[in-house]
């Protein structure tokens, strides 16, 4: 076999460098969070397990096998919009666990859009230009929404950013409204595009649905608790199968986020399977 | 087990490919066991090991590359970090500084580097270490050169 043949054979599979640990093509591409060196998810996870098994204390970081930089997590499942983090210390969970309320909101995002379309009259809301009236319940609703979607406790910056964007959009519209009359459709469209643009860097793939939900909440004109009551009632009525599917999806997502199995157990398990 | 086999096979292919590229190292895999390798390395120039060819034995553990290979000199060598009788090597990357990114080939390179830069402060061969630590470089060099001639060079005639 000529050298050229081998070179082609080993690099044509993924076109990039092989995983430094298995020397094969990288499977489930993942990166260390500080130095961004690339490995197979399985390979680097195994290495972390080996390193932690040599010390008695729980490790919080691991040195990169290539450059020895300290890293606290592996970034994986990157799909262009979102990614997951696998922490060296399994007790690190972004310091955040979803509350029941936040879980329910996340669940809503797994249902079909327009679940409550017949309950709240969205077109009437736009016709009456109710958006221009301040909604005092928006902040608490928005906070929980962002916490659920971003899985983070502190969402203040994003919250104030979005509230500010909405506020200035309303003010601008109000001023212009005095001079010209615009159709409710453009008003609605503009609202959606402005809010989506503001939210997208933080909510990525869920942005459009979030804007729909925001519109729905504003159109409802009721406070968070009342809104939740209506939503939950409809969720229950909606076939329960769909919800259980949604629940599974959420659980899976959480499972990925924080594996609570002690590393030693995982090691045993993997040895068995070999 | 399967993983280490696959990785060793990749290294095997790589070694076949690089043979020409690195004239100082010749890595050979045991015919019947991919976990056993031997290497012939050339003593680095401008050291008392120059001109010698040293044989190393690799025993690769099953969890490789998560665990380092065990390497020892089969050829006698007078070096502070190599046990004179067993050939055991004191080198951090073969112990706690091991990283799975090392390969058998790069371990050979590390050993060649160790030959050129002995660490007299962590000796496995005390006689050799003491010579260096007492500043007797000439004494050390002549001993090391003598053993290179005796053990690592083809016998003339």
Image (tube, coloured by chain):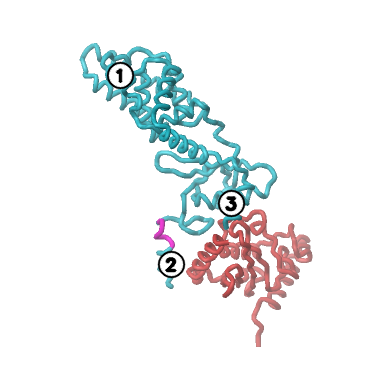
Chain colours: A cyan, B red
Q: Who comes first in sequence, dot 1 or dot 2?
A: 2
Image spot of residue A241 (x, y percent): 42, 35
As drawn, B10 above or below A72: below
Image spot of residue A262 (x, y percent): 62, 43
Q: Which mark is residue A121?
A: 1
Q: Which residue is identified by label 2?
A: A6
Q: Which residues are magenta?
A: A10-14
The answer to whether residue B108 is seen in the rendering is: yes
Label 3 vs label 2, nearer the camera: 3
Marks 1 and 2 share the same chain: yes
Q: CA distance from mark 1 to mark 2?
A: 66 Å
Dividing the picture into quadrants, the one containing residue A249 is top left
Dividing the picture into quadrants, the one containing residue A111 is top left
| Viewer-closest of B37 and A116 | A116
Whether residue A173 appears in magenta in the rendering, the answer is no
Q: CA distance from mark 3 to mark 2?
A: 27 Å
Q: Residue at x 24, y 22 (%)?
A: A185
Image spot of residue A104 (x, y percent): 46, 28
Chain containing the residue with disc 1: A
Chain containing the residue with disc 3: A
Image spot of residue B69 (x, y percent): 63, 62
Q: Which mark is residue A86?
A: none
């Amino acid at each position: 076999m000529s050298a050229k043949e081998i070179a082609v054979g080993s690099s044509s599979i993924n076109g990039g460098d092989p995983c430094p640990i298995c020397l094969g093509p990288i499977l489930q591409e993942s990166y260390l969070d500080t130095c961004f060196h690339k490995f197979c998810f399985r390979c680097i996870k195994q290495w972390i397990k080996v390193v932690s098994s040599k010390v008695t204390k729980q490790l919080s970081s691991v040195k990169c096998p290539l450059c020895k930089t300290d890293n606290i997590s592996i970034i994986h499942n990157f799909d262009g919009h979102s990614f997951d983090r696998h922490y060296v210390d399994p007790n690190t969970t972004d310091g955040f666990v979803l509350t029941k309320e936040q879980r329910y909101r996340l669940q809503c995002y797994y249902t079909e859009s327009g679940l409550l379309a017949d309950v709240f009259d969205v077109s009437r809301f736009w016709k009456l230009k109710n958006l221009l009236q301040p909604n005092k319940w928006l902040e608490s609703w928005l906070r929980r929404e962002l916490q659920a979607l971003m899985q983070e406790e502190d969402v203040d910056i994003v919250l104030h950013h979005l509230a500010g964007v909405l506020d200035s959009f309303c003010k601008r519209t109000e001023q212009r409204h005095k001079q010209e009359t615009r159709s409710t459709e453009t008003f609605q469209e503009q609202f959606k595009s402005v809010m989506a643009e503001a939210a997208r860097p933080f909510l990525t793939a869920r942005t459009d649905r979030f804007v729909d939900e925001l519109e729905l909440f504003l159109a409802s004109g009721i406070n968070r608790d009342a809104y939740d009551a209506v939503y939950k009632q409809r969720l229950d009525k909606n076939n329960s199968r769909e919800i259980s599917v949604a629940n599974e999806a959420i659980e899976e997502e959480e499972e990925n986020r924080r594996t609570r199995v002690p590393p030693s157990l995982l090691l045993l398990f993997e040895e068995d399977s070999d | 087990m399967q993983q280490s086999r696959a990785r060793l096979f990749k290294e095997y292919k790589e070694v076949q490919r690089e043979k020409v590229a690195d004239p100082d190292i010749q890595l050979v895999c045991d015919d019947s066991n991919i976990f056993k390798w031997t290497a012939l390395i050339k003593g680095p120039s401008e050291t008392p090991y120059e001109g010698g060819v040293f044989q190393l034995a690799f025993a690769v553990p099953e969890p490789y590359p998560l665990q380092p290979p065990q390497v020892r000199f089969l050829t006698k060598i007078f070096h502070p970090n190599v046990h004179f009788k067993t050939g055991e090597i004191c080198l951090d990357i073969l112990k706690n500084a091991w990283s799975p990114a090392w390969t058998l080939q790069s371990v050979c390179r590390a050993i060649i580097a160790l030959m050129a830069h002995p660490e007299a402060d962590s000796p496995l061969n005390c006689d050799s270490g003491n010579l260096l630590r007492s500043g007797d470089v000439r004494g050390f060099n002549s001993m090391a050169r003598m053993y290179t001639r005796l053990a690592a060079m083809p016998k003339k005639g």
